[in-house]
Image (cartoon, grey):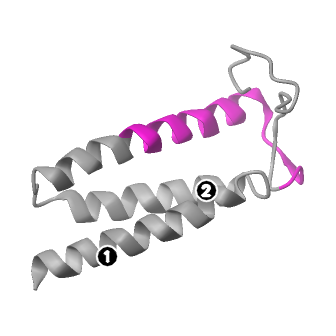
Amino acid sequence: MPWKLISIADLPYRTTILGGAVDIGAIGVRTIGLMWLGTGAAFVFLAIAVVVDAAWWYPAFLLTATVSTTACVVEWPRARTGVLVNVVVFAIAIAVHVQATS
C-alpha cells in the first residue's frame, strides 16, 4: 500500500509502475495513490451531478475518466480491470450525453 496504512499479503508495497519497469519511489507511489483517491471521489461527485442534471458534468467526466484510465494504464497489468470498467463507464456516459442533447 502506498501509504503503508495496512499490510495485505497479496498486495505488497512497491514503488514501481508499468509492470515493474519504472521505479518512481515512495513519493511517486503516493502521488499515484492520491490520483486514485481523487478520481474515485470525482466519479461519486459526477454521479450526483448527472442525477441533478448539472450542465458541466460531461466535460468534467471526460477529464476524470481520462485521468482514471491513465492511472490504470500506469498500474498495468494489476489494474487492467479498471481499464475495462472505464470503457464501460465511457460508453454509458456517452449514451447519456447523446440522449440528453438530442
Q: Main secondary structure of the magenta part?
A: helix
15 and 40: which is toward the camera:
40
Query: Mark on residue 82?
Result: 2
- Identify the secondary structure beneath mark 2: helix
44 relative position to 74: left or right:
left
- Identify the secondary structure beneath mark 1: helix
The image quadrant that residue 95 belongs to is bottom left
Residue type highlighted by circle 1: Ile
Precedes in sequence: disc 1 or disc 2: 2
The image quadrant that residue 99 belongs to is bottom left
Distance Cα–Cα, label 1 vs label 2 = 18 Å
Q: Which residues are magenta?
A: 19-41
For the C terminus, the image quarter is bottom left
Q: Residue at x 49, y 56 (%)?
A: 67
| Residue at the top extreme of this rendering | 5
22 and 85: which is toward the camera:
85
Residue 40, position in %: x, y? Answer: 45, 41
- Figure check: 77 above or below 44: below
2 relative position to 71: left or right:
right
For the N terminus, the image quarter is top right
Residue 63, position in %: x, y? Answer: 38, 60
Residue 16 lies within the magenta run: no
Residue 55, position in %: x, y? Answer: 10, 61
Q: Which residue is mark 1?
A: 94
2 relative position to 15: left or right:
left
- Figure check: 96 above or below 9: below
User: Dot 1: few (<14), some (14–19), or many (≥20) neighbours within 10 Å?
Assistant: some
